[in-house]
Image: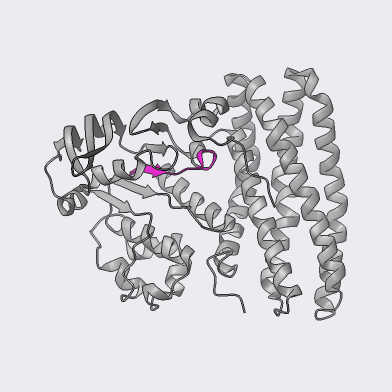
Amino acid sequence: MNTLDTIHEEHATMLAIYQALGHLLDEIKAGATPDWKLLATLLDYVLREPEELHHPREDRYLFPMLSEREPASRALVERLSSQHDEGREQMGALAAAFIRYQSRGGEGFETFERTARRYAEAAVAHIALEEHDLLPLARKVLTATDLAELDRLYREDGAQPAGEFRELFKKLAHRLPSPYGFGGRPR
Amino acid sequence: MSELLKLTGVRSGYGDAVVIDDMSFSLDEGECLALLGRNGVGKTTLLATLIGAADLHAGELVFRGRDIARVRSQRRAQLGIGWVPQERDVFPSLTVEENLTVVAVDGPWTLRRVYDIFPRLEERRQNLGNQLSGGEQQMLSMGRALMLNPKLLLLDEPLEGLAPIIVQELLNVIRSLVADGGMSVVLVEQHANKILPLAHRALVLERGRTVYWGAAGTLRDEPERLERWLGVRNHQDVRP
């Protein structure tokens, strides 16, 4: 599995997380009692994984390498990079909406839901752009030597947080209620 | 790595019906093979041939240096072929723990190790097989196959019908099994993009015959051929 496959896998994991978040929001809206610990763990993943693992490595290694090898990719790379910045700004709003919602014992769900869905929609659109445009271009343009160098950079940079997020994802998968995860039936 | 499995000119099916024809490939110890193809091309029949549940009409089937063409299913399992069927097939009247231990064979895979990769099964160890959700049943089915301590693990569409987060977690488990190198894996799946990144080799079937046999990475980078053979675009499904 090379770095481009790793990026693809991280996308698939985030999409699964966003889908689970959408299901949890649907259930709360339908009257289910919020599982605060589960929601907090899910948001911890949503807010930290892109910022601490996925985006920094793209910004530091993949984007510059692709821009250098294929000048025509620069507009795409700039767009994706600015989406990273926008996402970072939206994270604060999402965290604040969740803290308000939780601290008021369930009041303010509408604001939290709206903020969370807007954040997830933007993130999914960003992933779609990378899946449809960035990764196919990278597979076409980068040589075997480039990919080996990218593998090395990613491996040396992200090993520790990758392991941490892997464990966090495992916890989520086993805690999310069936049929979204391995956990118990939704109440 | 030494050769674990070798098929030469295999023709197989059910009764007189031939489903697999002129099939030849080999798999080394520790390798993962992605077995791909549209519905009804013979993927499950090929697995059934390996475990002895389909009729072998012609060809050679060698596992760990031994001709197993005439060896019965039960003996093939004892020799080290573990199978996780599409139907999951857990014993409904046994508890989770009984499902796991009833088939156990001594080796590196113990009850503790299965519980470590599937903590949910430990939580549910006293529940009956028929009280489990679909995802839990799939975990149990995989855990039971691991308790056989197989040299070759056959997984028949293990991700089918499961929620994305469960799919990702099972892929993580399969990836760690492959990286561990302790066993070879044959993974049948319709969604090539999910399994090609973790496979070493790929085999694509059309109407019971091989149309591609080679490196999984090479196939991964040929979306046009994948689309032609599998009828799907080989990119991530990005629907939320």
Which residue lies most toward the left here? B70
Write the residue at 77% across / 35% down.
A59
Residue B28 in the image: x percent, y percent?
A: 31, 33
In this rendering, position of residue A166 left or right of residue B199: right
Residue B13 magenta-highlighted: no
Image quadrant where one finds the N terminus of chain B: top left
Pick the front one: A124 or A147 = A124
Say how the picture is coloured: one colour
* Residue B111 lies in quadrant: bottom left
From what the image shows, is residue B174 above or below residue B93? Answer: above
Give the magenta part as a residue range.
B181-194
Q: Is residue B67 left or right of residue A110?
A: left
Q: Nearer the viewer, residue B80 or B186?
A: B186
Q: Dividing the picture into quarters, in which one does residue A78 lie?
A: top right
Which residue is nearer to you in this view: B130 or A86? B130
Residue in the image at 56% along x and 75% along y: A185
Q: Residue drawn at (30%, 72%), measured in percent from left and top?
A: B98
Tell whether B59 sits left or right of A118. left
Residue B176 at least partly seen: yes
Q: Is residue A61 visible?
A: no
Location of residue A175 in the rendering, given as x and y in whole percent from the top left corner: 58, 68
